[in-house]
Amino acid sequence: MNMKTCGIITEYNPFHQGHIYHIKKTKELTQCNCLIAIVSNHFTQRGLPSLLSMEDKTKLALEAGCNLVIELPACYAAQSADYFAKYAIESLHALNIDQICFGSETNDIVLLREYAKQMESTKVDPSLSMNRNLYSKDIQPNDILGIQYIKQCDKYNILPQSISRKDTFKSATQTRKEYFEGIAQFKDAYFNPNQTWDTYYPYLRKFLILTDTNILSTYFLVNEGIEYRLKENAKKYLKWEDFLLASISKTYTKARIQRTCMFILLQITKAQMQENNRFNQVIVAGFDSIGQAFLKDKQVITKFKELPKFLQEIELKCQYLSFDTFQARKVIYYDR
């Protein structure tokens, strides 16, 4: 079926009013027939456990106007901006989408593409942020991702488009903060309050203490001897926040520590990530009749047993962390 398609790359941690605006404005701007959201599952780009289950994210996205929701597994979601963009666009490209649309502080594709070119020609210091590498330009979080989206889109002849990010909408960070302070939030009946590093830290702490540093060094993102610092801090600190603050350094930001701890907790090795360094699969979470028609004759994954063994193992670990039991994969059909 020939459709004009558009992809959006999302986290929904949690789903808020700004996300509804993003969906609505994307449909207006692109005039797409089929809007496809790729959504981070159990962990997000900054290595945070997700407050919402994939099933609930899918329901909310479909209710808000998406036609198809596909999944970005934890190992591909919890990555720096360049790899997060790479994996998300690879999966969307497997569906041969025409365009993507993202929220942007500058709302200027030409400027962001220029920054992308500067990044290509600049010798990057991995210990510095993108802003520092670009001579202290004040690039905001959505634009940092936007630069990487554009680079990936250009590889696959996908049209990047943007909408202006509105400060009138509360951010996901602020929403989470207020929720844990006891303030009611939009759609908070869907939130799982146990989905925090405070909950996961006791398991991580014991694993760090009991595991030899030679083994810890085999896990993905564990570089530059960080395993020694993490192990020592696990011995010293009983609370996640104290452990996290003590582990941050010049080269290991808060987000990088969180991501690294996720890979250690899930015991995902460097070798495994090297073997699975492309994500050209489409894992279907839900659709309406339009999304279902679009998927006809396309190669997609709809069942747990169809996942590659590597992703099956990660899904099982994430689910046992979240629920203590395995929840069978179920594709949601939304009847408009």
Image: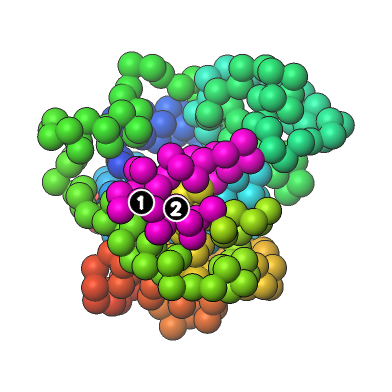
Name the secondary structure under disc 2: helix
Residue 262, above or below 100: below
Q: Measuring 39% from the left and 53% from the top, which residue is drawn there?
A: 236
| Disc 1 to disc 2: CB gap under 8 Å | yes
Q: Magenta stretch: give its range.
A: 229-256
Residue 184 quadrant: top left
Left or right: 277 in relation to 34? right
How far across and how far down the image is residue 153, in percent?
Answer: 69, 42
Q: Quarter holding the N terminus?
A: bottom right
Position of residue 279 relative to residue 25, above or below, is below
Residue 278: in sight, yes or no?
yes
Residue 113 magenta-highlighted: no
Total marks shown come to 2
Amino acid type of disc 2?
Asn
Report the residue marked by disc 1: 237
Q: Which residue is mark 2?
A: 233
Is residue 7 in sight in this rendering? no
Disc 1 marks which amino acid? Tyr
Asked if residue 313 lies left or right of residue 82, the reply is left
Q: Dot 1 lies on which element?
A: loop
